[in-house]
Image: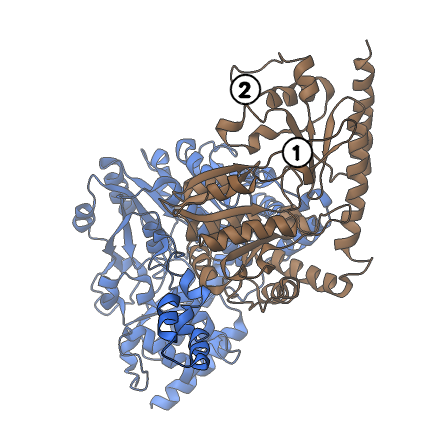
Amino acid sequence: MFLAQRRLCSLESRAKFLKTIYSSKILGLPTSAKMSLKITNAKRIEGLDSNVWIEFTKLAADPSVVNLGQGLPDISPPIYVKEELSKIAAIDSLNQYTRGFGHPSLVKALSCLYEKIYQKQINPNKEILVTVGAYGSLFNTIQGLIDEGDEVIVIVPFYDCYEPMVRMAGATPVFIPLRPKPVDGKKWSSSDWTLDPQELASKFNSKTKAIILNTPHNPIGKVYTKEELQVIADLCIKYDTLCISDEVYEWLVYTGNKHVKIATFPGMWERTITIGSAGKTFSVTGWKLGWSIGPNHLIKHLQTVQQNTVYTCATPLQEALAQAFWIDIKRMDDPECYFNSLPKELEVKRDRMIHLLESLGLKPIVPDGGYFIIADVSLLDADLSDMKDSNEPYDYKFVKWMTKNKKLSAIPVSAFCNAETKLQFEKFVRFCFIKKDSTLDAAEEIIKGWNRQKS
Amino acid sequence: GSPPNGYPPLTKILASFFGKLLGQEIDPFKNVLVTVGAYGALFTAFQALVEEGDEVIIIEPFFDCYEPMTLMAGGHPVFVTLKPGLTRDGELDSSSNWQLDPTELASKFTSHTKALILNTPNNPVGKVFSKAELELVASLCQQHDVICIADEVYQWLVYDGYQHVSIASLPGMWERTLTIGSAGKTFSATGWKVGWVLGPDSLMKHLRTVHQNSIYHCPTQGQAAVAQSFEHEQLHFGQASSYFARFPQAMQRTRDHMIRSLQSVGLKPVVSQGSYFFMADISDFKSKMPDLPGDVDEPYDRRFVKWMIKTKGLVAIPVSTFYSVPHRKIFDHYIRFCFVKDESTLQAMDEKLQKWKKELRP
């Protein structure tokens, strides 16, 4: 270009020549734009950059909004949990690196707790891995065990990270929705949402590497029964498939229901990774500690991922968690034990939230577990005409409208659906009830006001 | 909840603190990502930017995770070696003598080179890359349009008046550099596992995508504590009272103590300009006792370390671990010592060394 310009230069004035030389058109693109031709993202993350939480957390960040959206407890964690952490922070050695696969006193406590529940010995070093939240366990499991070309069955609605994590591993998610049974007048329960056994069986084939199970389920609150789990177990065994069981809400199960672990079924221990969460167990989501439990021949691969990703989790948090566990392990039959007291506390809040939503004319699905309730909001027939983005599903528009106009936030359930099933769930919105009384009081005020406006 | 890129008080202070150091306007949302240790930062960077077909230049000896992380991302590691220079008789070797051959380095860049990983101060050599050495790396990165992943976890641990220089502060480098730091190394709290990456939004957005699809959030408490710690340090920065001044001063003394002590048994330390470590040359031992017990293909330094642990009660790390497999047999005559230890550990070490020295006498 320079040479051509020089040749032409003799035909133009020198001043004009100097001006054009220094214009960006002649010199070419600025360095950063030139750089972007070669330096691009790795293909594994292509299309995985959007995230429902980022959008909706920003919306709900307005302090005047009553936030029933993100699953963030605003109740206090047990006092002893916080006290343990502050004691431990003062101990020098507990501020340095610990064992990568899990701090010894923590894996020992987890082993002790879960041996009681699984009714089998669980080796703390070989059959347990401590991760950065249950999220990290999901990541380690999928990265460690799922390959390009594999299929992974995902039940819709699903906790939103399952799909991008499966895709990031180069595998294909195969979706199957939970379907509602007709209820005829009685209260709609999460147990009315089930998998069709024939439809489920049709999703399994020789490429199926794993099925991701979430029980108690987010967002519906379904607690899978023994019979429902047996159907899944039978298919896993028949097709030699792994079961990734996300059981973070395992303690949050309400009267008349029991949390059942699929890993305890005959033939299932050897093919199941069961995931738990300190954040959900002790209402300390900010601690980001989770764990995977399973047979060594599977856990060892999660451990390999660990040593090539974060290597180890924070020491003081693990030690504090271990101490908190010991306190509650010693009193598991006691109503004071947090594993017993929290679900009791939450059941009251659940019932209150159900009542509030019903008073608005909604038909919420009563959850058997977890700390969310979903409800079909189209019954409110809200005027969403001023919500500009017409490409968004109904529930996205509704939540944005409700946040803006009613100062109440929630999460659209279609965020937990793949593209094809969004329409099936777009009328549903998810409310979180692990909130302190004053938050629920504020929600109640908004709902009363809403009712007054309607009449 | 916090934005996933990090707890706001921490990202804010990191942006202001490092913005000043790097001479760059740093936005807490677009240019900062908090990770689970610097280890997590490295993983996130590799996963975001390296894929099958990409080459990653790794300078040997290297912190051992760089190679498996490159491989896990489908990349191909290309090694270039820091070579020890000549030392005069009676003089101790220094990490500053260990250098890259410019021609050799240039030859490693191809059209497939995606990134170069630079660790300064370096683990295990303890080398602090000079401005001139960084300018060489920078010009090659710019010439070949390559990303520089700068692992600067030991940036405050610099001795003997040497200066840490961040390659991101050199002209033309901010837009292609990811600078990684560690609260664990900065504040001697490795168990907190809080690290960070600083870089241009055009690269950071891809790291954010990996982060939100792998762990999503880092623990809050560690981040809150690190934010407070930086607030405290910002007030003292540049003064004698600053932890970033006092700590390296104290560690320089420990380093010197250890260097003197180890020489008494015939180990030849390589005086490190920075980091927690120095290497010691064991070639004299290799010629005097070449046949130490071990596996057939086990490099000499591994056998030596096992022998030293068993018979002398002292632990070090064989440096061949930090080399690519084909080079381990060549660089098998150094072991790495960590000197970030307290008085009682140093005393215990001295006792063991005195015992060893006695055993040396014929």
Q: Chain of mark 1?
A: B
Which is more foreground, mark 2 or mark 1? Answer: 1
Which structural element holds mark 2? loop
Q: Chain of mark 2?
A: B
The answer for how far apart the CA atoms under marks 2 and 1 are is 26 Å
Kindly tell me whether residue A350 is visible in this rendering: yes
Residue type, label 2: Glu
Q: Quadrant of residue B218?
A: bottom right
| Disc with the residue nearer the chain's start (2 vs 1) | 1
Report x, y in % for residue A334.
Answer: 55, 49
Chain B drawn colour: brown
Report x, y in % for residue A27.
Answer: 42, 69
Report x, y in % for residue B362.
Answer: 81, 8
Same-chain status of marks 2 and 1: yes
Chain A drawn colour: blue
Kindly tell me whether residue A260 is visible in this rendering: no
The residue lying at 78 percent from left, 31 percent from top is B91
Report x, y in % for residue A58.
Answer: 46, 73
Which structural element holds mark 1? loop
Question: Going by the image, does A350 lie left or right of A365?
Answer: right
Mark sitting on residue B85: 1
Mark sitting on residue B298: 2
Question: Going by the image, does B85 lie left or right of A58?
Answer: right
Question: Going by the image, does A85 lie left or right of A355?
Answer: right
